[in-house]
Image: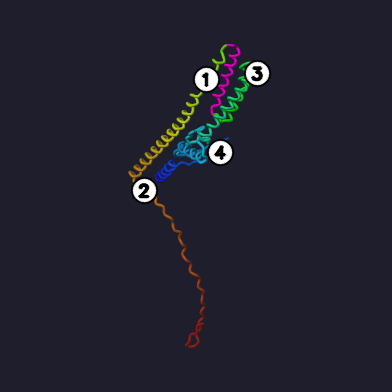
Amino acid sequence: MKVSSVITILLVSVILLGCSTSSGPVPFGKDSYMITVARGKGLSYAAKEASAHCASMGKEFIPRNTSNTFQGGFQGFTATLIYSCVDKEEMPRQKIATMQEKEKRAMAECKQKRLNGELKGYAESAQCSNPLILEAHREAGDPNMDLTQLLCAYRLALAERNDKGEMTEAEAQVAMAELGVRVSQEVRQRATQQQAELHQEAVDLQQQNNARMQAYGTLLQGLGTWQSANKIEMPKVSIPQTAMPNPVPAAQPRISITCQRVGDFTYCH
């Protein structure tokens, strides 16, 4: 391959690397979407597009999963973002309030059954209310169901200790409150970490793309210097003209002349 052709290919590749090709929001499971961005700004571009998509529906953008894959050669990185569009802050507050109301009602009803003698002890009361509590959290779309399950399991363990006389009901309530504080702290840390990871991934990807663009620019500059030093000119492209065939003269008809001499005269016809 000629050097000029290589330089042309590299120039086109560098130009393409600066462009972002996005798949746009694609439905990906229940209440989730996926955006794949090839080349360019990658994850940061995907996050911006996802945020605009959610905003167009009057909702907020929540990232669920991200990945960056290097495709090799001049293709650069392909970023994939999976996200959800959730209701804005006012609506989650309503959902949380409804969830908490269902939780309190379930605990109160099961406690009343224990007091009425329908349930034997604190453990059966916890076994009565725990499934209702978990259902309320699932309906509200709680993203930290593992922590809710932990709370329910811990509550049952404390209830069993109540039944054995190892602790009082007041002591169990204090222990549950302490665990509740730790769980709340964990929820906040998870949300903060998720946002920080998304931001860092976008920064890392941008730095990688910038470094690759700089490397290609250096390569092109070196090739241009080498081309100039060796006096290599870009090939001139000319369009050959089609040679027209020489015209063939038309055949002339033959004329037959007959001459005859009679005396001093010659007659031709």
Kind of element beneath mark 4: strand
Closer to us: 162 or 117: 117
Kind of element beneath mark 3: loop
Disc 4 residue type (three-letter): Pro
Q: Sequence order check: which comes first, mark 3 or mark 2?
A: 3
Label 3 close to label 2 by CB (< 8 Å): no
Disc 3 and disc 2: Cα gap in Å? Answer: 99 Å
Q: Is residue 145 magenta?
A: yes
Query: Which residue is label 1 attached to?
Result: 177
Looking at the image, which residue is at 59% across and 16% down? Answer: 159
Disc 1 residue type (three-letter): Ala
Query: Which residue is label 3 attached to?
Result: 116
Count of picture labels: 4
Disc 4 and disc 1: Cα gap in Å? Answer: 40 Å
Looking at the image, which residue is at 53% across and 34% down? Answer: 91
**Residue 204 percent across, percent down from the top left:** 43, 33
